[in-house]
Image (cartoon, helix red, strand yellow):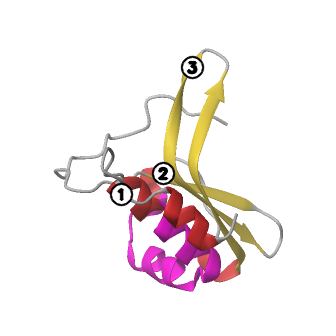
Amino acid sequence: MNDLQQLYRRSETKLVSPLEDFTTEALAIAIRHDGAPLLRMLSSVTDWRLGSGAPSIELSTVREVSAETQHYLYHEGLQGGRLDLVVELTATEGLKQSLWIEVKIDAPLTVRPERPRRRIS
């Protein structure tokens, strides 16, 4: 399915207004076409590495950026959940770092938890 077909699938109908899914898909398409703006944004955010609870790769070594939407989580003993956007950064030496991004439209800002409830490796 090409990019326009993906966006059309998420477009508004008389019954559904999937603005959040549409925005998520558009963001993923933009990241897939050019990950450089995302990397620039991450380099300007000073605490994203500390807040993630996991070691991260150096952004200057990233050679590939991929994005997947509506990613389902399945893990033994945990209820499945759905992540809006998963971005994977791959460094030149092959090390990978995943970023989980929750996309919100017209939602209030909330404070993020001090540390993840349960870490999935």
> Is 38 contained in the magenta span?
yes
| Residue at horizontal 63 percent and vertical 81 percent from the top | 33
* Total numbered labels placed on residues in the image: 3
| Position in image of residue 45 (x %, y %) | 38, 72
Query: Three-letter amino acid code at disc 2?
Result: Ser
Task: Say which label, 1 or 2, has the lower sequence index.
Answer: 1
Which residue has dot 1 on it?
A: 12
The quarter in which the N terminus is drawn is: bottom right
- Marks 2 and 3 sit apart, C-alpha to C-alpha, by 19 Å
Give the structural element (helix, strand or loop) at label 3.
Answer: strand
Please tell me which residue lies in front, 109 or 19.
19
Q: Find the magenta span and give its range.
A: 25-49
| Residue at horizontal 83 percent and vertical 71 percent from the top | 93
The quarter in which the C terminus is drawn is: top right
Give the foreground label among 1 and 3.
1
Is the magenta region chiefly helix, strand or loop?
helix
